[in-house]
């Protein structure tokens, strides 16, 4: 990749972006990034790749997607972990997680959605209405899902602005639900075959499954290093790696994460950390955190603690489970893909004991001194499930701090005070 400055404006214009609004958005991100990321001490060298990706977030990667389309490929936008990336790749598509981590065009959004809609849903509507997301504007198709009510209903309105396919995700995990979900996987295959003009075959799906599993294995390695004391990488940096996993080129990303994991493993051997060995260790769980939402990690780490793992969709829910690679037929592999995805423990499921087990297991594995449960305001599933997480944490003797927040900076001062008191109590 070259460092030479490139003028991407003609490409953005071609994609139909509102250039003025887009300039404003692009001007805001470096400031946020500088304050949260580039002020950290003793960062691993391997984070330079991720700094570069962030600096080219709407540039080089979009150019790659545009080139991919020009060569006959497709771009498929997603908003949820339950959409199988393996199938998209096997049909010559590039899966991209769509922008949903910042406030944008809320005035317009609130003409369509109630004010008390979660920030993630408002954000994806705002990015589309404001025409500032080159990922969504590059997408040939957006895959939505019936997870929470806010997303489900917002997709109906989003579908007036872009082509959308909805997957019906069951809300329970009984045998009948597994059958329903397997049928939805078949329907997705049909839709993607129509969109891409290709036919899914076993070899392509097997290869794509390996590639996506390799990406998840690399993230598992990175995260395993965080169990060490002192911790070789900050929580903010580890969060960023998972956020970027949603839209970077898969083989390149895997290679760079493996290189970072090599460095982290060497740091662990050398006892080299980003925080003192006695810094309180925190597990973060709750609603997903999309770029550029680094708020809570930033507050926790600036208060003197270190985030050692995340039970989040931008965390362990993304990389912990792999698709079984032993199938020998297309149907068998699609069964295994359906099984792997339905195994994710999102709060949209009822009941959802698997998430409680995951939180406790991760707290133990990563030797967390405390848990921060962070839900987006108006995110019913996570705000309500916080009560159960709080109960299991209490029964395991792990202190838990509950935070309900959004993407604004309005509550930062108040959150700092609460987090500092929590961290002091853990120390
Ligand atoms: S698998 S967490 S990505 S659904 S924050 S829109 S839940 S009201 S995002 Fe999610 Fe898939 Fe589940 Fe993960 Fe609704 Fe909550 Fe908003 Fe949310």
Image (cartoon, rainbow, N blue to C red):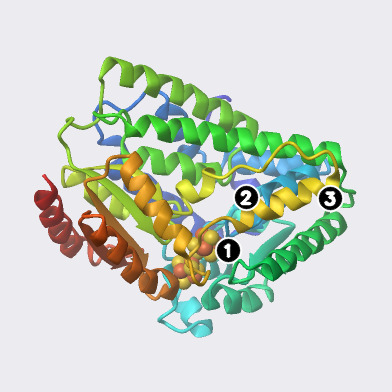
Residue at (78, 65) in percent of width and height: 183
- Residue 68: x %, y % from top left: 75, 40
Q: Secondary structure at mark 3?
A: helix
On screen, residue 411 versus residue 159, left or right, reads left
Mark 1 lies on residue: 131
Label number found at residue 139: none
Question: Where on the picture, by quarter, is residue 386?
Answer: bottom left
**Is 29 located above or below residue 308 in the figure?**
below
**Tag 3 or tag 1, which sits nearer the N-term?**
1
- Using a 10 Å C-alpha cutoff, classify the residue at mark 3 as few (fewer than 14 neighbours), some (14 to 19) or many (20 or more): few
**Tag 2 or tag 1, which sits nearer the N-term?**
2
- Using a 10 Å C-alpha cutoff, classify the residue at mark 1 as few (fewer than 14 neighbours), some (14 to 19) or many (20 or more): many
Q: Secondary structure at mark 1?
A: loop
Question: Where on the picture, by quarter, is residue 210?
Answer: top right
Label number found at residue 96: 2
Give the alpha-carbon distance from disc 2 to disc 3, as whole Å. Answer: 25 Å
- Residue 121: x %, y % from top left: 50, 70
**Is 192 located above or below residue 258 in the figure?**
below
Q: Are marks 1 and 2 in contact (CB under 8 Å)?
A: no
**Tag 3 or tag 2, which sits nearer the N-term?**
2
Question: Which of the two discs, 2 and 3, sits closer to the camera?
Answer: 3
- Cβ of disc 1 within 8 Å of ligand 1? no
């Amino acid at each position: 990749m070259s460092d030479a400055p490139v003028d991407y404006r003609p490409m953005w214009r071609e994609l139909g972006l509102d250039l003025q609004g887009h300039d404003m958005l692009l001007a805001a991100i470096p400031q946020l990034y500088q304050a949260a990321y580039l002020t950290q001490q003793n960062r691993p060298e391997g984070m330079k790749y991720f700094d570069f990706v962030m600096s080219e977030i709407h540039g080089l990667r979009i150019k790659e997607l545009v080139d991919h389309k020009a060569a006959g490929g497709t771009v498929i936008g997603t908003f949820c972990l339950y959409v199988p990336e393996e199938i998209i790749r096997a049909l010559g598509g590039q899966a991209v997680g769509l922008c949903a981590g910042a406030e944008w065009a809320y005035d317009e959004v609130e003409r369509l959605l109630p004010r008390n809609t979660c920030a993630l849903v408002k954000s994806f509507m705002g990015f589309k209405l404001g025409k500032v997301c080159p990922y969504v504007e590059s997408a040939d198709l957006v895959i939505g899902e019936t997870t929470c009510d806010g997303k489900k209903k917002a997709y109906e309105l989003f579908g007036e602005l872009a082509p959308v396919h909805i997957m019906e995700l069951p809300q329970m995990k009984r045998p009948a639900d597994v059958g329903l979900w397997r049928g939805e996987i078949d329907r997705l295959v049909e839709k993607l075959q129509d969109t891409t003009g290709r036919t899914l075959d076993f070899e392509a799906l097997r290869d794509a499954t390996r590639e996506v599993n390799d990406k998840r294995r690399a993230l598992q390695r990175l995260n395993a290093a965080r169990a060490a004391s002192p911790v070789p990488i900050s929580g903010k940096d580890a969060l960023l790696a998972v956020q970027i996993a949603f839209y970077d080129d898969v083989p390149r990303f895997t290679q760079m994460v493996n290189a970072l994991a090599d460095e982290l493993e060497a740091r662990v051997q050398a006892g080299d950390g980003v925080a003192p060995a006695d810094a309180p260790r925190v597990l973060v769980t709750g609603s997903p955190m999309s770029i550029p939402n680094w708020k809570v990690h930033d507050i926790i780490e600036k208060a003197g603690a270190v985030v050692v793992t995340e039970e989040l969709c931008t965390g362990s829910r993304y990389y912990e489970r792999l698709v079984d690679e032993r199938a020998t037929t297309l149907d068998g592999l699609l069964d295994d893909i359906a099984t792997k995805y339905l195994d994710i423990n999102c709060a949209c499921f009822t009941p959802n004991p698997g998430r409680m087990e995951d939180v406790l297991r991760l707290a133990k594995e990563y030797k967390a001194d405390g848990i921060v449960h962070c839900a987006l305001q108006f995110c019913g599933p996570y705000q309500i499930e916080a009560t159960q997480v709080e109960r299991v944490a209490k029964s395991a003797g792990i202190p838990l701090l509950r935070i309900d927040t959004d993407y604004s900076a309005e509550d930062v001062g108040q959150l700092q005070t609460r987090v500092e008191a929590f961290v002091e109590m853990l120390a």
